[in-house]
Amino acid sequence: MERKERLVLLVIILCAPQIHAPPIEDIAVVASVGVAIIAGIVSLPNLYCHFTECCEDKNSADIAGLQTALRWRVFGQHLVSETVLKALVGHLNDEAPNKALAISFNGWTGSGKNFVSKIIAEHIFKKGMKSNYVHLIIATHHYPHQSDVEIYKRQLRDLVERSVSKCPRSMFIFDEMDKMPLGLVDVLKPYLDYHPPGAGKIDFRQSIFIFLSNTGGDLINAAVIKHWKDGKKREDIKIKEMDEVIKQGEFDDKGGFWHSSLIEKHLIDYFIPFLPLERSHIKLCAEAELRRKGHPVSELIFNKVADELSYFPKDLEVFSQSGCKKISSKVDYVMGRMRTMEISIFIALSDRPG
């Protein structure tokens, strides 16, 4: 018996005593209970989804919330905010997309790749990253050995097919693509390729694949530094000029995409660059973290946190080497040091005579 059928039976059993309890002449009560049961059965999908997680459809995605989150929670990444929203809205609104959505996030560590992936999951799935239909695959954790790549291929194929068969709008996030065993992602080609409606037993065209990689990070940084030295505004950097920079990195660097059919067959829909973060962005990250932890906020504290990080290039010290990745620990350190100083001052004042 299916789970939904069992739930119908449970509803009827629970309501049965109420049906037989009133006198037979109380037709109104019996009728109202009967109507309630029928209404419950008719609205069974909604009732069922109160007890367990259901596959989300396009109407459940919080696009307005996603737009707000990308605007106010992601700092210094105008290309990310613009392109991610465009890509997801287009895919989610398409009743019959030609292929699964494939996005590559490229940039140095700490620039926000994982953070943005989490935001996307939160606004498409009610349970966010905890959803049964959101899968985070970390190269060094799940697929650490090049020698076992054939085993990994079978595991990955099984994961994708099993998840998409349960929920066509499944999401797969591949972290550390630059450390992925060579040849592994080629197994994804059938799922990311173009397919006509009705092709195959499982329809992969509504699913979403996000690849996170440091590949191309050096080239992105070099391009941004040149842009800065030329006196141009950061916001004037266009996605088109960075697109070729990233693709060159994917072709040249021996990461998970190196000589991959996904690259050679142009199956990645968007290459999105995460630019290196400047000191002003680090201060915004510090403010957000201070507020999240319930600490007081001030320009003095923002600067103290920003001072704890290292910057490049050495002759300019404009961009953070670790982005916002270390902000949480640096906030704890700065606030702890400030409390220690306050306590020391308090003790010193208390020890004064008179």
Image (tube, rainbow, N blue to C red):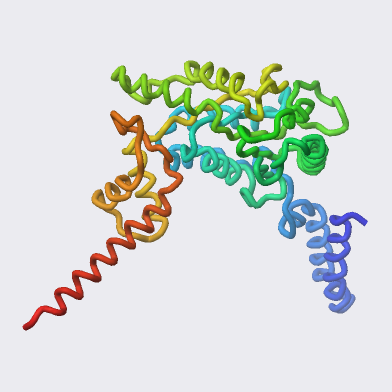
For this rendering, which residue is in front, 198 or 23? Answer: 198
207 and 25: which is toward the camera: 207
> Image check: 195 left or right of 138?
right
Query: How far across and down, in percent of the image, does residue 43 sit?
Result: 77, 53
- Total labels drawn: 0
Question: Residue 62's spot in the image, x, y percent?
Answer: 57, 42
Kindly identify the residue that appears in the image at 81 percent across and 24 percent down.
197
Instruction: Indicate left or right for 217 with 197 as reference.
Output: left
Q: In which quadrant will I find the N terminus?
A: bottom right
| Quarter location, residue 292 | bottom left
Residue 22: x and y, percent? 84, 78
Outermost residue, left side = 354
The outermost residue toward the bottom is 354
Quarter of the rendering occupied by the C terminus: bottom left
Q: Is residue 75 left or right of residue 266?
A: left
* Of the pair 129 and 349, the residue shown nearer to us: 349
Q: Which quadrant of the view contains residue 120?
A: top right
Q: Residue at x 59, y 29 (%)?
A: 104
Position of 45 relative to 13 (above/below): above
When the figure is inspected, residue 173 is found, relative to residue 251, above or below; the finding is: below
Asked if residue 47 is positioned above or below residue 123 in the image, the reply reads below
* Residue 116 against residue 263 in the figure, above or below: below
